Structure formats: C-alpha cells, structure tokens
Amino acid sequence: APENGICKRTSSSKKQVNAICEIVSCATGSGSKCKTCKNFRDREAVDHCDSCNPGYYVSGTSCKAYSCGASCKDCVAQNLRTKNDHCSACHSGYFLDNGECKPYDCDSKCKSCVAQNLRTQ
C-alpha cells in the first residue's frame, strides 16, 4: 500500500485479490487552496479539501470563494466573508442588516411611495 494514496481491491477470481493503488496528492495553501485535506484514504480527487481558508467554502472536492453580487454596493474583504453577498454597504433604498442588504419597505398606509432607490427609511 502507498504511504499517501488510495487502494482499490479487484478480484479476478474468488481466491485471487489484487490491490490497485493510486496516489492522490493534496496541497494546502492560502486563498482558494485547501486549508486542510481529506484523509488520504478518503480522497476522491487531487486536492480534495476537508476545510477551506476564511472567505471560502467546500464545494464538491475543492474550495470556492464566497461571491459578491449585485445586491451589494460593496462587500466585506474576501477573507471576512461567511456567505455569498456578504455586504459592507448597500445601494440607495436599501439598508444593511447583518451583512445583507434589505429594501426599505413602502408603508401600507401610504397612497403611493417614492421609487426604491429614493427611500431612506
């Protein structure tokens, strides 16, 4: 058996068992690289991540960055993100609530409301 890899057993008959071993490497590092790797016996791909660096999450076998979408005017720094669209500032007409931009509502008592981007409360 290899020191760092995966072995699969195959059998051509009931009496003979062969081991086919494949070494699957995993490197750790900063950014989108793995913070920690899966145990070598559990790896299904090269760089099979068990955990990711701050601002990234495990997706399948690799690390993906939390994104900053159009719902935010600005997002927190990548390494501080704990979710997609982790906002630090909002567009006009929206307010920040726990890192998420939410629209100011139109009060049902009003006959009509100003456009969303002009709302301030």
Image (cartoon, helix red, strand yellow):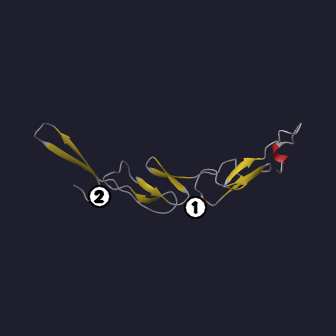
Is residue 73 among what the camera can see? Answer: no
Q: Is residue 28 above or below residue 15?
A: below
Is residue 25 among what the camera can see? Answer: yes
Q: Quadrant of residue 38?
A: bottom left
Q: Which mark is residue 4?
A: 2
The image position of residue 106, as x and y in percent, is 82, 42
Q: Is residue 89 above or below residue 103?
A: below
Q: Residue at x 12, y 41 (%)?
A: 16
From this viewpoint, which residue is outermost toward the front?
109
Q: Which secondary structure, mark 2?
A: loop
In depth, the one of 93 and 108 nearer the eye is 108
In the rendered structure, which amino acid carries the disc numbered 1? Asn
Q: Which secondary structure, mark 1?
A: helix
Q: Which mark is residue 79?
A: 1
Tell me: 107 left or right of 28.
right
In depth, the one of 32 and 87 nearer the eye is 87
Q: Quadrant of the N terminus?
A: bottom left
Tell me: 38 left or right of 115.
left
In the rendered structure, which amino acid carries the disc numbered 2? Asn
The mark closer to the camera, 2 or 1, is: 1
Tell me: 3 left or right of 72.
left
The image position of residue 14, as x and y in percent, is 12, 37
Q: Is residue 102 above or below residue 108?
A: below
Q: Quick one: label 1, few (<14), some, or many (20+) residues within 10 Å?
A: few
From mark 2 to mark 1, how far is it between C-alphas?
A: 30 Å
Q: Quick one: label 2, few (<14), some, or many (20+) residues within 10 Å?
A: some
Q: Residue at x 51, y 53 (%)?
A: 57
From this viewpoint, which residue is outermost toward the right?
111
Q: Residue at x 70, y 47 (%)?
A: 71
The image position of residue 2, as x and y in percent, is 24, 56
Tell me: 38 left or right of 107.
left
